[in-house]
Amino acid sequence: MLNRRTFTGMLAAAALTPRIAAGETMDDRFSVMIWVLRKRASFEQNLETVAKAGYKHIELIGEFWQWSDAERERNVAKMAQLGITIDATTGMKLGFADPATGDAYIAELRKLIVAARQVKCSRLILMSGKVLPAVGDEGQRAASIATLKRAAEVLEGEGMSALLEPIDRLENPTYWMDGVEEAATITRSVGSPRVRVLYDLYHEQRTRGNLLEKLAKVLDQVDLVHVADVPRRSDPGTGEMAWPVIYRRLKALNYKGMIAMEFYPDGDPMEALRKARLEAERELA
């Protein structure tokens, strides 16, 4: 017998999953880096937007450091209600490419693992930190490999994994690891399945380009792809990047990892995120 509570729950589920009623696919590979929505609404309201757009995952930039215990419990409960999980988060101040901070880096990594576990996240996004002219590229590369080998042991012991994210120097002129090929070189040298690469197509296109050839070169190291169009970090299809071609290339290379939307929606966030997901699904199917 259908009671009031069951009926209400069914209505809520239907409202938050329009993709089912519309006959849309249920590809579980898509996520939203939720910081791009933070000026639009509250965290909980943005979670609802993500769910209505047909996503099951979000990514964070360490927002949980600012949450009280009560806020954390409320946000984790809201995600559970909506069927959303956190597939990755940043959250460290130190970078892995500084030879002088190896011990401090590992200590901070351990703290991030504790915090990430509290919000049920098992994958971290790690940053290189600043260019150090006195150390040089070779020195920073060597420091990165040495520190990340230690980090891999910690991650293995904790049942966690990590992704290295290059950032273009138009956005951050002081950032050291500014290309995906450098990231892949480092992870190959680290030699651990716990340390992989985040290929942010927006960052790579801004200063380096040649995205498709690099996909073939580095995809064996990649477990996460970030999506936003150049030059405005806007909706796919509003800038200079050929997203159908990129998605078809990912399909041809048999990419099975996550794809996260990290763009500022030009219009209604739910509609923009839904459209981006459907367009990607169509080319990847």
Image (cartoon, rainbow, N blue to C red):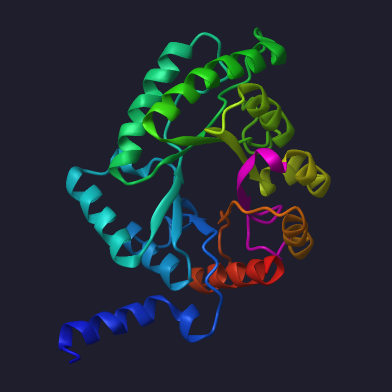
Give the image location of residue 230, x and y in percent.
71, 53
Is 23 positioned to the left or the right of 213 in the image?
Answer: left
Q: What residue is at 25 percent from the left and 80 percent from the top?
A: 9
Q: What residue is at 37 percent from the left and 19 percent from the top?
A: 107
- Residue 197's place in the image compared with 93, above or below, is below
Q: Quadrant of the C terminus?
A: bottom right
Is 91 positioned to the left or the right of 72 in the image?
Answer: right
Give the image location of residue 281, x and y in percent.
63, 69
- Residue 206's place in the image compared with 9, above or below, is above
- Dominant secondary structure of the magenta stretch? loop
Farthest-out residue, bottom:
1
Residue 240 visible in the displayed image: no
Give the image location of residue 187, x and y in percent.
63, 28
Q: Is residue 229 magenta?
A: yes
Q: Quadrant of the N terminus?
A: bottom left
Q: What residue is at 70 percent from the left and 36 percent from the top?
A: 180
Q: Is residue 225 magenta?
A: yes
| Quadrant in which residue 273 is drawn | bottom right
In the depicted view, which residue is nearer to us: 22 or 267?
22
Residue 201 visible in the displayed image: yes
In this rendering, the count of numbered labels is 0
Magenta part of the chain: 219-241
Give the image location of residue 18, x and y in percent.
45, 80
